Image: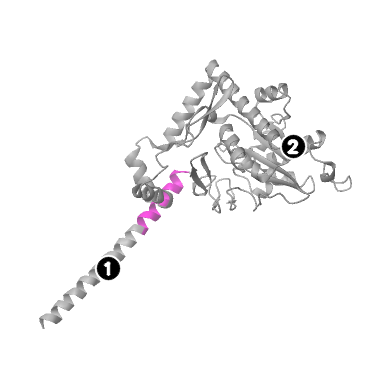
Amino acid sequence: MNEMTTKGTRLSIMKRLVLLLIIGALICVSVEASARLILRYKEPEEVVPASIGRFDERLGWALKPLAHGTSRRTGYEIDYRINSQGLRNRETTYQKPQGTFRIVVIGDSRTFGWGVPIEKHFSTLLEGYFQNVEVVNMGVSGFGVDQELLYLMSEGFRYQPDLVLAYIPHYGDNRHMHAERWGAGKPQFNLVDGKLVLTNCPVVTKTTSPTRLGRLNRFLNEHSAAYRIFYTGLTNSKGPENQATAQEKQDEKDLQDDAFRTQLNELGEAIVYAMHDEAAKHGAGFLLVTQIEELHEAAVKKKILSLDVLEPLSNDRFVLPAPLGHINESGNGVLAWEIANFLKAEQLIPTSHLRTAKNSNL
């Protein structure tokens, strides 16, 4: 009888534990669902999901190979699909196909295609103006010109480009003047006696060699809205939004200083000159596409081919709704048109890759 009573007690305890586990799971699901609803209404959806990015010890950050995410922040769903080599581009071999003229495009979020379907992005549209021309999109959101140069040197030339196209619309957030942006470490060049000196590479960051606790924290931050709310409140009473605002205010203050602006432009120009020189070393042409008048003028003086697209893109209808601040599909169409015309006018595309008059859109 005692044995039966003991078994019954154990069974009763087990049932209670299972019931408690079920109740606990339901509570967790409810809390998580509520947290996601709170974030949905409190915080706007990311234009580009953070989950497609990763830490990179040489570049600071990069795109995660084979990652996939979507966002409806622009009003309709945009698909962000990353290929096996970490590019927002179709699968592309390093070995250039025979008979193909290949253009490697480097840049920041506009080159990446922030808020724009890849099929309507200028890198895709550009291919349509020619035949047997392949454009490899190496844009990464948030990159400064310093990271773009490093990415070109480490990966870009592996694609055997015939032409390197650097789209530098701005020096946004003074990125190449800092070894950290948005709370993430990044490499930085200094200009010493007219030469570029690389610093903070490999990137010094707390996440370079994460502990088990650090990996768990990062996993929960990425996958749990409830944990993200708790962690943000626990570690930072000001919140990331106020941090970003503080950075923007500091950047604006820096730009009011004449010495800082001079250094900003001189360093940016030196990095672009290095891009041009590296392309020449690898037997590739180089084209700068920019909306920075000072950079355009400096490049022309250096006899570097440069296309100023400030005026063509000045149409207010080419901009995504505020405060997104990037060019929309129409703007990408105009950008592709301007680049295609310039490439043809400067004879940067071999005659064999030009469309015939009958089929040409130019």
Numbered circle sitting on residue 19: 1
Answer above or below: position of 97 versus 338.
below
Question: What's under tag 2, amino acid-wise?
Answer: Ile
Residue 314 seen anywhere in this rendered image of the structure: no
Q: How far apart are marks 2 and 1 (CA)?
A: 65 Å
Q: Residue most toward the bottom?
A: 1
> Which quadrant holds residue 323?
top right
What segment is highlighted magenta in the picture? 29-43
Residue 208, image quadrant: top left
Q: Is residue 285 magenta?
A: no
Residue at left 73%, top 43%?
A: 126
Residue extending furthest right?
Answer: 358
Element carrying mark 2: helix
**Foreground tag (2 vs 1):** 2
In the drawing, what numbered circle is on residue 339? 2
Q: Name the residue at 79% across, 45% down.
A: 130
In the rendered image, the residue lying farthest to the left is 2
Mark 1: amino acid: Leu
Q: Is residue 231 above or below residue 274?
A: below
Mark earlier in primary sequence (2, 1): 1
> In terms of image quadrants, where is residue 267?
top right
In the picture, the quarter occupied by the N terminus is bottom left
Q: Residue 294 carries which label?
A: none
Residue 331 percent coordinates (x, y):
68, 39
Camera sees residue 61: yes
Hey, which residue is sitting farthest front in the picture? Answer: 281
Q: Where is residue 310 in the image (x, y as percent from the top left)?
A: 69, 29
**Residue at 27%, 68% in the rendered image:** 19
